[in-house]
Image (tube, helix red, strand yellow):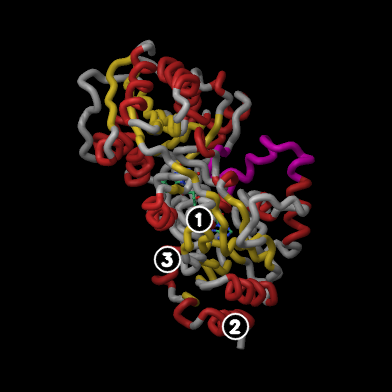
């Protein structure tokens, strides 16, 4: 029997034959990412159901020198969740157990394959919530969110995924289990695996279970959509929201041309009778609805350049306002294969960034369509570019070059993956990178876990 045949037999013995997928049609959805920009053939897809099964799967791969790609919901946007060619995809989706909820502490232990929306549904009736929320909530998994240190829509209030994780359990490339679940709130006993593995993008371990700290959402929530005459006006209002609204928990932006493009593809009414140049979506919580509306209203009234404003306090109305913002990535994706550049700018560089980035893109791809939107409260904008071929990196270079010049980050929240690895040397110092490689070598000397992700091979 060939070595591959032996490995597949060993994997079947661990997870059962239906959970080792080798058929090309059945593998297909695991082999291409959400944007369709990144794809590759897998040797097989393996679906362990527990930490013990994951250990046995990883050990078998290690024994045969087989490279592995951990995969959760496959909504990652930088190519890290799909094979490059010949790897075993370790899908965590069967590890989807949730709870029980610790209602007194506001904590829950979940399997890494639990989908965010399912965890939200389990904890919200008791008044708790997961601190991170994002548009991919129906598919992304908690393990994937930890592995990418996902940010999303409430970072202004609750921070990214790193701040939600109390502890985790992960399987290293040789099969050792690290971390502790359930974890303790206070535990200063040396290196903390949840800190090391958060944001490691599947290159150091397969995360199997996560202990989450939950957040309390205020009883009343109000969402406001404000149209403004210019992006600097939108930024000035964003600053005022930051200063004035204690319960601020989201601050998002998009632009007139993006809204126009979204409206060409989906049925969305104009938000205001007058068109605006830039739009700011803000959400805040308070003990009383009236109080939240009053506070937000006063801040908007005092702002300059307001073209129109809408406020919603009920779930349906708030979802309607969010739709204007959340439809952007959806429409970008359904209209082609977007180059997705997710960047953070220092706040003082933000006002000039939109015009300058459009100029730089036009210089290398005059016919490209640019969609700008994002979590402006964190200085984070998503630059989506439609038109250039997936393998053409001229636009990526133009955008990321500008970001580095302005002192920003080349990846705000999506990670490095394979999309941005060649850029890392221009962003992190040589010492930084060597220390990162040393960590990788120490934990995965054969380079079996997600090779080619973060580090250029
Ligand atoms: C419509 C849309 C909106 C989005 N909005 C946001 C946003 O606002 N903020 C944001 O941060 N991201 C956003 N994303 C990106 C994406 O949803 C996040 O990166 C998410 O955290 C990925 O989770 P996943 O389970 O899909 O991971 P996958 O895509 O499966 O994997 C992502 C990376 O994590 C690794 N990985 C996955 N699971 C594990 C595990 N258990 N152990 C070890 N490594 C693992 C993979 O190898 C890969 O490198 C969005 C994506 C879409 C499609």
Q: Which residues are magenta?
A: 411-433
Residue at the disc numbered 2: 10
Residue at the disc numbered 3: 28
Looking at the image, tell me whether mark 3 or mark 1 is earlier in sequence order: 3
**Residues packed near mark 1 inside 10 Å, few (<14), some (14 to 19) or many (20 plus):** many
Q: Which is more toward the observer, 380 or 114?
A: 114
Q: Is residue 265 above or below residue 22?
A: above
Q: Is mark 1 within 8 Å of ligand 1?
A: yes
Residue 365 shows up from this direction: no
Q: Which label belongs to residue 121?
A: none
The mark lying in front, picked from 3 and 2, is 2
Where residue 88 sits, quadrant-wise, is bottom right
**Residues packed near mark 2 inside 10 Å, few (<14), some (14 to 19) or many (20 plus):** some
Label pair 3/1, CB-CB below 8 angstroms: no
Q: Residue at x 45, y 29 (%)?
A: 248
Looking at the image, tell me whether mark 3 or mark 2 is earlier in sequence order: 2
Residue at the disc numbered 1: 142
Looking at the image, tell me whether mark 1 or mark 2 is earlier in sequence order: 2
Where residue 293 sits, quadrant-wise, is top left
Q: How many marks?
A: 3
Q: Residue at x 25, y 34 (%)?
A: 263
The CA span between labels 3 and 2 is: 23 Å
The CA span between labels 3 and 1 is: 23 Å
């Amino acid at each position: 029997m060939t070595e591959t045949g032996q490995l597949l037999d060993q994997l079947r013995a661990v997870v059962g034959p239906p959970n080792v997928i080798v058929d090309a049609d059945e593998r297909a959805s695991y082999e291409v990412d959400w944007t369709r920009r990144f794809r590759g053939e897998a040797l097989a897809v393996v679906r362990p159901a527990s930490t013990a099964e994951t250990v046995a799967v990883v050990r078998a791969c290690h024994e045969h020198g087989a490279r592995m790609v951990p995969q959760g919901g496959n909504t990652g946007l930088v190519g890290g969740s799909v094979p490059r060619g010949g790897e075993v995809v370790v899908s965590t989706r069967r590890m989807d157990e949730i709870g029980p909820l610790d209602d007194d502490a506001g904590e829950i232990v979940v399997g890494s394959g639990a989908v965010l929306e399912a965890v939200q549904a389990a904890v919200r009736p008791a008044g708790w919530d997961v601190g991170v929320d994002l548009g991919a909530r129906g598919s992304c998994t908690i393990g994937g969110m930890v592995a990418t240190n996902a940010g999303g829509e409430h970072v202004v209030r609750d921070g990214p995924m790193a701040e939600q994780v109390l502890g985790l359990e992960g399987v290293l490339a040789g099969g050792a289990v690290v971390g502790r679940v359930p974890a303790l709130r206070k535990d200063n006993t040396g290196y903390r695996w949840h800190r090391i593995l958060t944001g490691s993008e599947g290159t150091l371990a397969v995360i199997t279970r996560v202990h989450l700290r939950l957040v309390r959402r205020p009883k009343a929530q109000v969402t406001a959509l404000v149209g403004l005459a210019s992006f600097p006006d939108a930024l000035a209002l964003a600053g005022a929201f930051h200063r004035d609204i204690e319960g601020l928990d989201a601050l998002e932006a998009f632009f007139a041309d993006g809204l126009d493009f979204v409206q060409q593809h989906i049925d969305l009414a104009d938000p205001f009778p007058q068109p605006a140049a830039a739009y700011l979506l803000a959400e805040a919580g308070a003990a009383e609805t009236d109080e939240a509306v009053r506070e937000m209203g006063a801040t908007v009234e005092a702002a300059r350049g307001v073209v129109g404003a809408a406020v919603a306090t009920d779930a349906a109305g708030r979802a309607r306002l969010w739709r204007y913002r959340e439809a952007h990535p959806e429409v970008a994706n359904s209209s082609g294969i977007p180059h997705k550049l997710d960047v953070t700018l220092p706040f003082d560089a933000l006002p000039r960034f939109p015009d300058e980035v459009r100029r730089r893109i036009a210089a290398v791809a005059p016919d490209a369509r640019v969609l700008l939107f994002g979590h402006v409260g964190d200085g984070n904008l998503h630059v989506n570019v439609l038109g250039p071929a997936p393998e053409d990196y001229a636009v990526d270079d133009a955008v990321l070059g500008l970001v580095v010049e302005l002192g920003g980050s080349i990846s705000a929240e999506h990670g490095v993956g394979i999309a941005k690895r060649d850029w890392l040397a221009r962003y992190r110092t040589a010492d930084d990178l060597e220390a990162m490689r040393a960590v990788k070598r120490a934990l995965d000397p054969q380079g079996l876990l997600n090779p080619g992700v973060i580090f250029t091979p």
